[in-house]
Amino acid sequence: MMLKFFKNLTVYLFLFIIADIIFSNFIYKDKFKHSCKETLGSQGFFHLSANCNIQEKYIKYARPYKVLTDRNGLRYSGFSRDSNKENIIFFGDSFTYGLGLNYEDTFIGILEKKFKKYNFLNYSVIGYSPSVYLYQLEKIVYSNINVKKIILPLDITDFSEESSGWNYKKGDNYPTRLNDIKKNEKLKKESFKDKNFKASRFIASKVNNFFRNVKLNRLYKNKNKSKTPGKTSIGNFLYTPIDQTDPNLWKPLGFNDGIKKLELNISEISLLAKKINAEFYILIYPWPDTLEFGQKEFNLEKFSTALCLKIYCMSTINTFSEFEEVRKTDKESWLNKLYILGDLHVNKFGHKLIADKISTEIFFNEK
């Protein structure tokens, strides 16, 4: 009896494998993706591929979330845009991208639903910084897109990224990585497994997502109170002397030269915004450890305000006080109330705080 069972099982598995190979090569020819990120050439630059439709699960304690990109490779809601409307441009990295969240739960998704007279264009990609934003805005200006407002979120990672990550000079085809440039590197070919077993991978991903949600439902049910956030290696320069931070974060330029580069790139962005008669804003928000340990060594709020005064900038949209108010009034559970469990990225509630602040600051007289 058992022998017959295993024989039948072997036959079924063999037939399924053959069917999967046929399906993968002749029916579903697209790559099976877990991310929309796509690398260009061998110089380290990446962007989001166009017309991507996937379920992402980057963050350990976040449920799988849907990601759609439009024909230009921008994450969006899936709703068509009106070419006659003025455009609101958002640059940014993983926070603005909405890592861990469905698009409608991000602050851009919330604003899009509220202010229907504009198109909201989200140019953010995980890992980007002002060097890349400058490159993106140059392309926007060249394309003659009608831009009403530009919002640049200044993230804590931007300081290390400008020191050790991205580099861009006018005339370059696209930005490169300071520490990751590999010349003449051949593009990685699609493996036999990736090419031929798309159905199997699809089924496995659905099963994995189901059990992930079951586990997270149980975990969130038992996690009503916050733990004290730990210090982060990237964000601790705000409250730790710079010579006691990880030196690799600032190589090869160094911390001070990295700041100068960041300021120069944002200044260039603001001048381009002025050239196309677009309002330019800087947006800032705190990480969990910033709220816990402060900014005694480097004050992001003061830095952003001073930078905004030096360049063409309408104002700094500062959400620190809104986040701090939640921390003061909800001392036991503020961390889980504002941030994704076990992570430093803002959750749905935190994104709503940011959306409300932007509404108050720059859309106060509009509907």
Image (cartoon, rainbow, N blue to C red):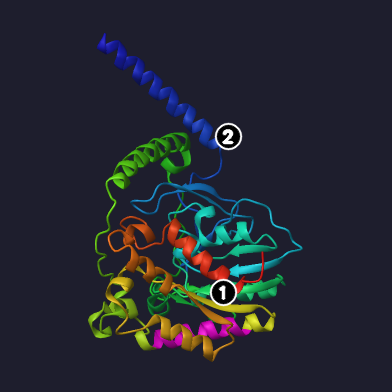
Report the Cα–Cα distance between label 1 and label 2.
50 Å
Q: Is residue 202 magenta?
A: no
Quadrant in the rendering for residue 326: bottom left
Circle 1 residue: 361
Tag of residue 161:
none
Tag of residue 27:
2
Q: Secondary structure at mark 1?
A: helix
Q: Position of residue 218 (x, y in %)?
A: 30, 41
Question: Which of labels 1 and 2 is toward the front?
Answer: 1
Q: Farthest top residue?
A: 1
Say if residue 218 shows up in the picture: yes
Residue at the spot 26% in from the left edge and 8% down from the top edge:
1
Q: Position of residue 354 (x, y in %)?
A: 49, 66
**Label 2 neighbourhood size at 10 Å, few (<14), some (14-19), many (20+)?**
few
Q: Farthest front residue?
A: 329
Instruction: Choose between 32 and 317: the one closer to the eye.
Output: 317
Q: Secondary structure at mark 2?
A: helix
Secondary structure that dominates the magenta span:
helix
* Amino acid type assigned to the residue bearing label 2 in the image: Ile
Q: Farthest bottom residue?
A: 310
Quadrant in the rendering for residue 289: bottom left
